[in-house]
Image (tube, rainbow, N blue to C red):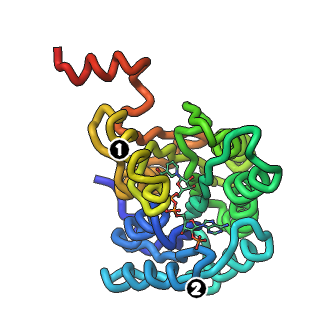
């Protein structure tokens, strides 16, 4: 049984849909007070409405993680609403595919700017508040793609997601004296609106490559993020947790076939 974190102030970037929405609703369900952030205000408002309808506390805020001014305003909105920032889930990310040779400089900048620079800007904006509090939890949404695996079309994405882990390790050291921990969740293939956009063939092939036999749910990721925010996880920092149904484990297609054969 974990101690209650009810009442804590939580920002989740990219929570208008997908994994971020799942994280926000999970924290809302345990009594945290949420700032639901995405560029599309109507989607953030819908998620905030879902949380309040379930008896929780949530407000919506429109912001682009690529813009420092937006991140500063986001942190201020959380402080104005809830008096502080206990937990930041830096989750906003994009994964448009483009193979090398086709990928443009603008494609590269867009992915790095959102996924990696966006992480830096969100964290930087919340730091003054967390440092003054002498406490904070920062949870990044990275990926298996980049830190553990590769996939054609995602060299920029993989670089951004591996980059988040490099950022995390040094941030964890720098922020430890302020009692701020920094950890990462590394989702495998999770059933979200964004993933569905990659097409039915992609989804089917991913399902077939997961030993546990299904895509992950947003709740699977939200549960791991919630763990990093608990008092019981206070001594864990600079770490990453793969949540992928065993997807990165088979060393070859033959290993998967052997598993399926059951012999
Ligand atoms: P999604 O369904 O496309 O949702 C992404 C969310 O991020 C949306 O709310 C989107 O809203 C927001 N967002 C995108 N760009 C933003 C920006 N510049 N500023 C603020 N918000 C922004 O994606 P998802 O599948 O949930 O992915 C969420 C995170 O998990 C990403 O970091 C992704 O890399 C990671 N991940 C996902 C999977 C997977 O299988 N789904 C696997 C590994 C890692 P707006 O467009 O309205 O801003």
Tell which quarter ligand 1 is in: bottom right
Q: Secondary structure at mark 2?
A: helix
Tell me if I can see residue 169 in this picture. no
Task: Tell me the crowding category of disc 2: few under 14, some 14 to 19, or many 20 or more residues within 10 angstroms, Cα based.
Answer: some
Tell me if I can see residue 30 in this picture. yes
Q: Is residue 124 above or below residue 157?
A: below
Q: Is residue 34 above or below residue 184?
A: below
Task: Tell me the crowding category of disc 1: few under 14, some 14 to 19, or many 20 or more residues within 10 angstroms, Cα based.
Answer: few
- Picture residue at 48% right of the left edge, 59% below the top: 197
Q: Relative to residue 207, is residue 91 drawn left or right? A: right
Q: Position of residue 183 (x, y in %)?
A: 57, 46
Q: Residue furthest top?
A: 263
Q: Is residue 9 above or below residue 235?
A: below
Q: Which residue is mark 1?
A: 204
Q: Which residue is mark 2?
A: 81
In depth, the one of 90 and 27 nearer the eye is 90
| Sooner in the amino-acid sequence: mark 1 or mark 2 | 2
Q: Quadrant of the C terminus?
A: top left
Does the beta carbon of the residue at mark 1 sit less than 8 Å from ligand 1? no
User: Which quadrant of the figure has residue 153?
Assistant: top right
Q: Relative to residue 175, is residue 195 drawn left or right? A: left
Q: Secondary structure at mark 1?
A: helix
Q: Is residue 73 above or below residue 136?
A: below
- Picture residue at 38% right of the left edge, 84% below the top: 52
- Picture residue at 45% right of the left edge, 68% below the top: 21
């Amino acid at each position: 049984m974990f101690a209650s974190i009810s009442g804590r102030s939580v920002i989740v970037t990219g929570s208008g849909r997908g994994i971020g929405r799942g994280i926000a609703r999970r924290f809302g369900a345990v009594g945290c007070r949420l700032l639901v952030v995405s560029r599309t205000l109507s989607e953030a408002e819908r998620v905030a409405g879902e949380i309040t309808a379930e008896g929780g506390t949530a407000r919506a805020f429109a912001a682009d993680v690529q813009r420092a001014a937006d991140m500063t305003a986001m942190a201020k909105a959380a402080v104005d609403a809830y008096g502080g920032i206990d937990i930041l889930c830096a989750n906003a990310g994009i994964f448009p595919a483009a193979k090398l040779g086709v990928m443009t400089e603008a494609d590269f900048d867009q992915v790095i700017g959102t996924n990696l620079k966006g992480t830096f800007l969100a964290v930087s904006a919340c730091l003054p508040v967390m440092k003054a509090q002498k406490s904070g939890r920062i949870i990044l949404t990275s990926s298996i793609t980049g830190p553990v695996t590769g996939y054609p079309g995602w060299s920029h994405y993989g670089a951004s997601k591996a980059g988040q882990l490099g950022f995390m390790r040094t941030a964890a050291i720098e922020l430890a004296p302020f009692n701020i921990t920094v950890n990462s969740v590394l989702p495998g293939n999770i059933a979200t609106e964004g993933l569905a956009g990659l097409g039915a063939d992609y989804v089917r092939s991913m399902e077939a490559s997961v030993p546990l036999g299904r895509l992950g749910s947003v709740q699977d990721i939200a549960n791991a993020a919630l763990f990093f925010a608990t008092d019981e996880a206070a001594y864990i920092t600079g770490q990453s947790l793969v949540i992928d149904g065993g997807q990165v484990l088979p060393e070859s297609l033959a290993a998967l076939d052997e598993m399926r054969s059951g012999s």
